[in-house]
Image (spheres, rainbow, N blue to C red):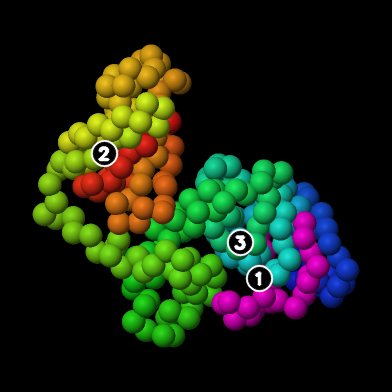
Amino acid sequence: MDFDQICKLGNICTLKSLNLMENGIEEIKLPDCEPREKLKIFVALEQLNLLYNPIWNEADTFNELDKLSSLKRLNKSPHLKSDFDEMFSKAVGMISQLEMLNKIEVSAEARRDASYDIWKRYAMEWLQAADTPEILYDFYKKHRTYAEIIEKYGSPAEFVVRPKSKQSNLIKIRVYNQQSGEIWEKRVPRMITVQTLQGLIAKRFQTTSSSSSSLPQLSYIDAKYPELVVPMDNSAKTLDFYSVQDGDTVIVK
């Protein structure tokens, strides 16, 4: 149960696979190191099994595991307040070299989406730390992959400071039907739910029945960051939740 004791195995330089399933582990804590450095323990460890341990903080766990230089395959049960999709996004976004989680391969698209999720989730915290070197250093220790994500996708400052108070309640979006190639421009409320938008799109393109199980799958491309495609996979959330803005493109699958 004590991860300090488990860390003693890190001196075995040939250790490639470690099974810690059902050990009662509540916290993963590795030795300290610089935010962009890797540890000199568990240097060959490629596969780690943490299934069925009552680990209470997923984000801290994945941040710690990013310190391992060779970790490629991880098995872990989701936290009780989480689900697999949320855990997958956190793990892929926070463990830079991860290639497989619970036997599911990490595609380039999944890594891009997970990185965007991390970029967005911690944007405000990064902005508050950015002007003070000591605080920024502590931020990068808590979010080890964030500096690399910023190098790839740019500063989130503009994303954070988008004005809210004077925004119109309506936004104009472009809806692109991948199957037919048709584009539909539509003004919709910011607070419209994804499910309601799915219904409007299904009616417009006549793509599906009214059954919620067969509604079209949606994602969107940010007009300012066109390389990022964000899945809109929670039908109960609003466009405002996903930060959809004027001029963004919604993709219909």
Depth check, mark 2 against mark 1: the one in front is 2
At x 73%, y 66%, the residue is 70
Which image quadrant: the N terminus?
bottom right
Left or right of 215 in this view: 97: right
Give the label on residue 67, or none: 1
Dot 3: element: loop
What secondary structure predominates along the stretch shown in magenta? loop
Left or right of 59 in this view: 170: left
Is residue 17 covered in magenta? no
- Specify whether residue 158 is in view: yes
Residue farthest to the front, as pictured: 181
At x 58%, y 77%, the residue is 36
At x 44%, y 20%, the residue is 214
At x 48%, y 78%, the residue is 138
Q: Which residue is disc 3 drawn over?
A: 95
**First along the sequence among labels 2 and 3:** 3
Is residue 40 covered in magenta? yes
